[in-house]
Image (cartoon, grey):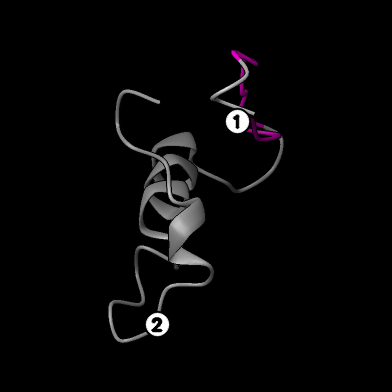
Amino acid sequence: MLDAGAILALGSDYPVAPYEILKIMADAQLRRPVDEPETAPILPDQALTAAE
């Protein structure tokens, strides 16, 4: 999708849900929960860079 020029949007239901957008963004970059460093990444080839 990025190669085709599509705009990718991340989101959350914050502040009505207990999710922090910075944590969601970190999870997208790491492909694992940011607070679980021992967890193996899921589909690491789908990770986003900070610029993406």
CA neighbours of label 2 inside 10 A, class few (<14), some (14 to 19), many (20+):
few
Tag nearer the camera, 2 or 1 = 2
Q: Is residue 9 magenta?
A: yes
Real-space Cα distance between discs 2 and 1? Answer: 22 Å
Which numbered tag is attached to residue 27?
none
Which numbered tag is attached to residue 40?
2
Residue type at tag 1: Leu
Q: Is residue 35 above or below residue 14?
A: below
Splitting the image into 4 quarters, where does residue 16 fall?
top right
Element under disc 1: loop
Element under disc 2: loop
**Side (left or right) of 7 relative to 45:** right
Q: Is residue 13 magenta?
A: yes
Q: Position of residue 32 (x, y in %)?
A: 44, 67
Residue type at tag 2: Ala
The residue sitting at 62% across, 23% down in the picture is 9
Return the residue at label 1.
Answer: 10
Q: Position of residue 13 (x, y in %)?
A: 71, 34
**Between 5 and 16, which is closer to the camera in this rendering?**
5
- Whichever of callouts 2 and 1 sits on the residue coming sooner in the sequence is 1
**Side (left or right) of 23 relative to 43:** left
Picture mark count: 2
The residue sitting at 39% across, 38% down in the picture is 22
Q: Position of residue 42 (x, y in %)?
A: 52, 72
Q: Is residue 24 above or below residue 42?
A: above
